[in-house]
Amino acid sequence: MAEDWRGVVSGVAYCLIFDRELDDAVVERVTGFLLRQPLYRLEPEEQYQALLQAVESGADLASPIAEQHSGEDLRDFLRRVLARMDALRPWPVPPYLRLDGHRFPEEFSGTRTIARIAVDRNHIGARIGWWDTVQRDGREWDVLLLRLASGDEVALVVAAGAAGPVELRHADPGRPARSVLKAFCAATGFTRREVRPTGLAALPWFLG
């Protein structure tokens, strides 16, 4: 679809709301953000290509989100971000990527709950991303589906609109729960006190 890049440019503009000068420090900050926490479930390379399309489009890039910067200022800034992204290749694997939560009902059907997260759902959303609301078994659930840097895919699940409890589910029965929990905490910054294993996962988790 034409101009799919506009959403990515808007995301970058949002990062610039409080910046009066688009200096090298801002380029470094925004580049780091794009590589560590990609926008809109995109891979870093997809973000790069969207920004490249924007720069080459000839369209006016002025944004009401960061209205203190002209379209040409933003185009120049994006060129510098692209150059910095190129200089940092090969890019580090982001600690996690958000996936489409609507995969949950089918692909996580019958999955095991390996932990409960002792944090309010709103705080979880603020820390790692927004929730998708999906239908399953005639009920609505809020879901955060993540692919961790380890390759593990996990789902954080809570009844729609509820504060908790938030379950952490994992689909691969051949992968030790302890390993998934360690990968989850390493990727998201949640602590062992906040992540409470269930069943047989608990003992090796706290011993490890």
Image: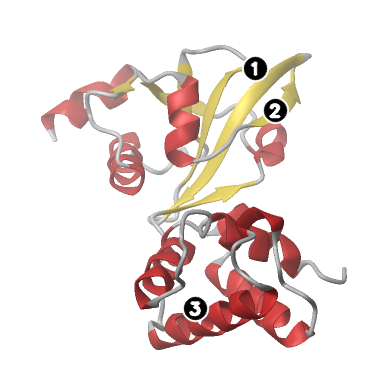
Query: Counting residues from the N terminus, which is met first, the one under dot 2 or under dot 1?
Result: 2
- For the residue pair 208 and 67, the one nearer the viewer reads as 67
Question: Where does label 2 land, which residue?
Answer: 133
Q: Position of residue 122 (x, y in %)?
A: 49, 23
Label placed on residue 160: 1
Q: Residue at x 60, y 68 (%)?
A: 69
Give the secondary structure at mark 1.
loop
Q: Residue at x 34, y 72 (%)?
A: 25
Residue 138 falls in image quadrant: top right
How many other residues sit within 10 Å of disc 1, few (<14), some (14-19) or many (≥20)? Answer: some
Query: Counting residues from the N terminus, which is met first, the one under dot 1 or under dot 3?
Result: 3
Label placed on residue 81: 3
- Give, as a three-letter code, the residue at label 3: Val
Query: Seen in the image, is 199 located left or right of residue 67?
Result: left
**Quarter of the image with the C terminus in it:** top left
Query: Counting residues from the N terminus, which is met first, the one under dot 2 or under dot 3?
Result: 3
- Give, as a three-letter code, the residue at label 2: Thr
Furthest residue toward right: 1
Give the secondary structure at mark 3.
helix
Query: Seen in the image, is 50 located left or right of residue 81?
Result: right
State yes or no: discs 2 and 1 in contact (Cβ < 8 Å): yes
**Callout in the foreground (1, 3):** 3
